[in-house]
Amino acid sequence: MRDWRNEPGMEPHPEGGFFRRLYTSPGHVALPRGERPLATSIHYLLTREQPRGKLHRNRSDILHFLVDGGPVRYVTAGERGTVEYVTLRPGGEHFLVVPGGRWKASHLVEDAPYALVAEVVTPGFDYADHEFATAEDVAHLGQAAAELAPFLP
């Protein structure tokens, strides 16, 4: 088993787990909230010591690809309270798109020791477009709020 935490550039991620920036597009797009790269990409790593990513949302679409390890389960929720679960696993489902504006969180499942996911964000990631959820943010989601509670920061 490869220890991805020791890869050059890997550092703690504010959402939980670890990450390293892989790519930032040299091209940019002008948006009402400012200029953004056309795309960015990271490796995102969850481990037994850091098995959960906190509930958050971004304004941009994010594509997730399981690279190594797993399985890892994603939980997403829209404004109408629809909660969806997708498990990325070796030899099975290994790709997920989370549209901009949806709450999402992730966690290791089935005793997985780690999961390394490549994420591509388009338009590119900017911390100004990122938001961690609070209990107040999801309270209006009814039963979904209870399902999301374990992922709140």
Image (tube, helix red, strand yellow):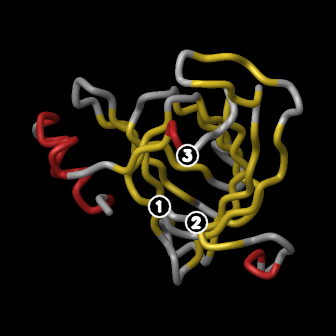
Q: Gap between marks 1 and 2, in whole Å?
A: 9 Å
The answer to whether mark 1 and mark 2 are in CB contact below 8 A is yes
Where residue 104 appears, as percent x and y from the top left, is: 43, 44
Q: Residue at x 86, y 25 (%)?
A: 27
Position of the N terminus by quadrant:
bottom right
- Identify the mark nearer the N-term, 1 or 2: 2
Total marks placed: 3
Check disc 1 and report the residue beneath it: 53
Residue at which label 3 appears: 127
Q: Residues within 10 Å of mark 1 (few under 14, many from 20)?
A: many
**Three-letter amino acid code at the position of disc 1:** Gly
Spatial separation of the CA atoms under disc 1 and disc 3: 16 Å
Residue underneath mark 2: 13
The one nearer the camera, 84 or 77, is: 77
Q: Is 40 left, or right, of 54 in this rendering?
A: right
The spot of residue 67 in percent (x, y) is 77, 55
Residue at 16% over, 51% down: 146
Kind of residue sitting beneath label 2: His
Q: Secondary structure at mark 2?
A: loop
Q: Is residue 10 left or right of residue 31?
A: right
